[in-house]
Image: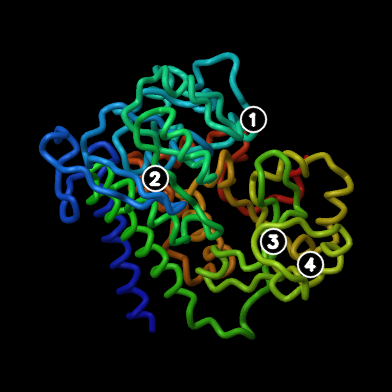
Amino acid sequence: MKKRRLITILACSLLLAGCGQTSSGSASVSGGVGVSSSASSDEVSPIIVTDMIGRAVTVTPGSYSKVVCIGAGALRMYSYIGDVSLLAGVEDIDNTSLESRPKMFDGVARPYLIANEATFRTLPSCGVGGPQAQTAEAEKILSCNPDIVVSEYEDLDKENALQEQLGVPVITLRYGPKGVWDDAVADSFTMLGKVFARESKATELNDFIDGCKNDISSRTANVAAEDKESVYIGGLGNWGTTTHLMTAKNYEPFNVAHIKNVCDGDGEQGNGIHAIEEEKFVSLGESMDVMILDAAAIKNIKGNSEYLTDLEGTKAWKDDKIYLQMAYNAYYTNLEMALVNTYYGGKVVYPDLFEDVDMDEITNRVTKSFLGKELAPEIKGYKFSYGGYQHIDLGTFFD
């Protein structure tokens, strides 16, 4: 068993190292359309792609030189696959040089912004962006003179209308309820790779994610049910509005790492991120062997005597087994952080099986693969990262 796990670990390490050598700005291309990112439009023929909301869009792969991304998470996904030097504008929320802009996420690490902030600061506005921006701003988009638009607005009729108004292709992405582990993410990457003639990068990133999933899952697959602790995940959901009461049933990072979720057996219906009543949290308290809190909730828990009383009543608090993971929902999902959080959950719950995993090292490998840069120090340094992954010191942390 140990020999088999060592082989799996080494295989994933090789995959991690190999993927880390290719940045989003220098991917080569193989297979598929098979054109370079510098190809001119007369070297390839237009094709029809079906985007993530089922729209048939005609594109000319590799021909685009002025790209605009709109809607929560669109610029993030493009940054993973595309060439950011081709951007013709960004939403105000991603341009930190502006004084007047949505700033609700400024204290939380968004790796795509960290990696590309210098570029984003030089670009004109294609819209305000942020949680309050529910529609595309066509006039601002037109002022950037794009030749293609990458969107995360998922209303089919509105996307068709926007495309007609702009006169350029509008391709729509999708994340999906399982985040980094969702098929919609892999399919969105594949589509971006095809449209921008960066299929090699898309394939490498999808293979990297699959390799990490296999590594995490194989480490824990043979843990007997009777040997598993019950774990509570809290503080999920929208940045800045969440508390310890925002949890998840059928939480995919726990599924991947074979972690027993205390809420999966609570008898209530529904899956995904949801709030539970305070009374329900209290009733589950003695079943919480371990608690992992997302950093997104900490600023609301600190100094709140009612919330702290809830936590103090749990078995995890009494046994000093409360841990901090990094916030992964901030202007949609930081997919690389969701992946790193999955490793961290495994390390917290099964420390012997993840003894070889160093959180700084795995964070750097993941951000290198997604964004071409090692970003662990920068991520830890953000105000609302609270110093990074850690066992929470109950004597001082919540002061």
User: Does residue 241 appear anywhere in the picture?
Assistant: yes
- Residue at 27% from the left image edge and 56% from the top image edge: 203
Task: Choose the circle earlier in sequence order: 3 or 1.
Answer: 1
Give the spatial CA distance, label 3 vs label 2.
26 Å
Residue 107: quarter of image:
top right
Instruction: Check disc 3 and report its element: helix, strand or loop.
Output: strand
The crowding category of the residue bearing disc 2, from other C-alpha atoms within 10 Å (few below 14, some 14 to 19, many at least 20), is: many
Query: If you read the primary sequence from the N terminus, does the residue marked by circle 3 or circle 4 appear first?
Result: 3
Label 4 crowd (10 A; few <14 / some 14-19 / many >=20): some
Rendered image: mark on residue 201: none
- What residue is disc 4 on? 315
Residue 340 location, x and y as percent?
48, 54
In the rendered structure, which amino acid carries the disc numbered 1? Met
Q: Residue at x 24, y 45 (%)?
A: 198
Residue type highlighted by circle 4:
Lys
Residue 61 figure quarter: top left
Q: Which label is found at residue 291?
A: 3
Q: Is residue 214 left or right of residue 285?
A: left
Query: Residue 367, labelled with which disc?
Result: 2
Q: Measure the C-alpha gap from mark 3 to mark 4.
A: 9 Å
Along the polypeptide, which appears first: circle 4 or circle 1?
Answer: 1
Answer with left or right where residue 153 lies relative to residue 302.
Answer: left
Marks 2/1: CA–CA distance: 23 Å
Numbered mark located on residue 104 in the image: 1
